[in-house]
Image (cartoon, rainbow, N blue to C red):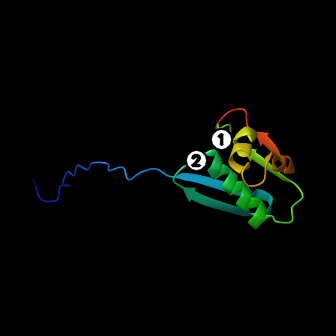
Amino acid sequence: MESGQPQPYDYEYEPLGTAVNFMVTEPLAGWRKVDVRDTRTAVDLAWEIKQLLDVDYPDAKKVVLVSDNLNTHVPASLVQGIRARRGPAFVGAFGNSLYPQPW
């Protein structure tokens, strides 16, 4: 190799696993929260919403969720995830707005 020439370097991508980001935002207030998890099950979604309601907005009378159309972002999954804790009536405490297509 000649002096002053860049040395070729070959690398191999090493996957280290995957992660799921749950993001909650209130744009008009300039607020957001991101939680990183290993899975994205209905139980994970229910836990994130529980944290949102119990910790971030404990006094809110209504919270409107705007989500994409991922299969766990539907009321049935939410009921499944929280049934053991609060029951299906809890789902009526918030509105739900689904985007018809992914971003």
What is the three-letter code of the residue carrying label 2?
Answer: Arg
Q: Is residue 48 visible?
A: yes
Identify which residue, 41 or 25, lies in the foreground: 41
Q: Quick check: 9 left or right of 49?
A: left
Instruction: Indicate the secondary structure of the residue bearing disc 1.
Output: loop
- Residue that numbered label 2 is attached to: 40
Q: Is residue 33 above or below residue 97?
A: below
Q: Depth check: 30 or 102 in front?
A: 102
Q: How many neighbours does mark 1 have within 10 angstroms: few (below 14), some (14-19), or many (20 or more)?
A: some
Q: Percent position (x, y) of residue 54? A: 77, 64
User: Mark 1 belongs to which amino acid?
Assistant: Thr
Residue 67 shows up from this direction: no
Please report the residue visible at 36 percent of the width from the left and 49 percent of the height from the top.
15
Q: Specify the quadrant of the image occupied by residue 28.
A: bottom right
Q: Which residue is mark 1?
A: 72
Name the residue at 78% across, 54% down.
86
User: Foreground: 87 or 39?
Assistant: 87
Across and down, in percent, residue 27 comes to 76, 57
> Are the two marked residues, 1 and 2, in contact with CB atoms closer than 8 angstroms?
yes
Sequence order check, earlier mark of 1 and 2: 2
* Residue positioned 68% across, 56% down in the render: 48
The residue under the point 64% across, 49% down is: 43
Question: On screen, 95 above or below 37?
Answer: above
Q: Secondary structure at mark 2?
A: loop
In this view of the protein, which residue sits in the foreground, 3 or 37?
37
Q: Residue furthest right?
A: 61
